[in-house]
Amino acid sequence: MRKGSRAQMLQQVFVFILAGLIFILIIGYGYRAIQYFLERQEQVVLVDFRHDLEIGVEQVKRDFQSVRRLTLRLPSKFAGVCFFDYSRCAQVSNPQLESPNGLFRLGWARDACVTGSENVFIVPRASERLDFPDVEVPEGYVCIPNEDGVRVRLEGTGRKARVSAWS
C-alpha cells in the first residue's frame, strides 16, 4: 500500500508541474496576442487619420471660401500634427509644436518638406508618410496639438485647401 501512495504522490506532483507549464504558456501567448492587437490598433488609427484628412481636403479644396471643421483622431502618445506648405517651407525658421506633452522642435520636418517628400507630420514621428500637395498654409507651417483629437480648419480656395487650427 505504501508503494501505491508514493506513486500517486509523484503523479500528482507531475500533474501540478504540467498544469503550471501550461498556465505559463497560455499567459505568455495571451500577452503576445494583446501586444500584437495594440500595435495593429495604432496602425488602424493612423490609416483612419490619413483617410479622414484626404476626404476632408478633397471635399473642401474646390469650394471657394467654404469652411469645414475636421476633428482627426490620434492615439494619445502623439503630441500633434504639423502641416507645411511646399512653396513656403524653405523660409520657415525654427518650426516647433507646443503641446501639453512638451515642446517639440521640427527641423527634421522642415527638411523633409524642402526635399518634397512629405508635408504633413505626426509628432513624434510616425511611420506613416503623409504627402498632401493640395494643402496650403499661409504662414508656411502650422502645428496643431492633439487634445482629444486634432481640430483642423479647412478652407477651400478653389484649387487647394487652406489649413489652420480651429479656434
Image (cartoon, grey):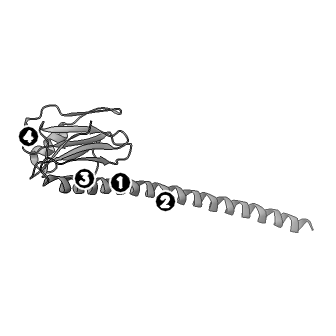
Instruction: Estimate the spatial distance between the alpha carbons at disc 3 and disc 1, rounded to whole Å.
Output: 12 Å
- Looking at the rendered structure, the kind of residue marked 1 is Val
Residue under the image location 32 percent in, 53 percent down? 46
Q: Which residue is mark 4?
A: 88
**Which of label 2 and label 4 is nearer to you?**
4
CB of mark 3 within 8 Å of CB of mark 4?
A: no
The percent coordinates of residue 96 (x first, y second) are 22, 33
Left or right of residue 88, residue 37 in this image: right
Q: Secondary structure at mark 3?
A: helix
Q: Secondary structure at mark 2?
A: helix
Give the quadrant of the C terminus.
top left
Q: Earlier in the sequence, mark 2 or mark 4?
A: 2
What numbered label is drawn on residue 33? 2
Instruction: Estimate the spatial distance between the alpha carbons at disc 3 and disc 2, rounded to whole Å.
Output: 30 Å
What numbered label is drawn on residue 53? 3
Instruction: Estimate the spatial distance between the alpha carbons at disc 2 and disc 1, rounded to whole Å.
Output: 18 Å
Within 10 Å of the Cα at label 3, are there few (<14), some (14-19), or many (20+) other Cα atoms?
some
The percent coordinates of residue 150 (x first, y second) are 31, 43
**Which of label 3 and label 2 is nearer to you?**
3
Residue under the image location 52 percent in, 55 percent down? 31
Instruction: Estimate the spatial distance between the alpha carbons at disc 1 and disc 4, rounded to whole Å.
Output: 29 Å
Residue under the image location 54 percent in, 58 percent down? 30
**Which of label 2 and label 1 is nearer to you?**
1
What numbered label is drawn on residue 45? 1
Q: Earlier in the sequence, mark 3 or mark 2?
A: 2
Q: How many marks?
A: 4
Left or right of residue 133, residue 9 in this image: right
- Looking at the rendered structure, the kind of residue marked 4 is Arg
- Looking at the rendered structure, the kind of residue marked 3 is Leu
Front-most of residues 7 and 163: 163
Q: Earlier in the sequence, mark 3 or mark 4?
A: 3
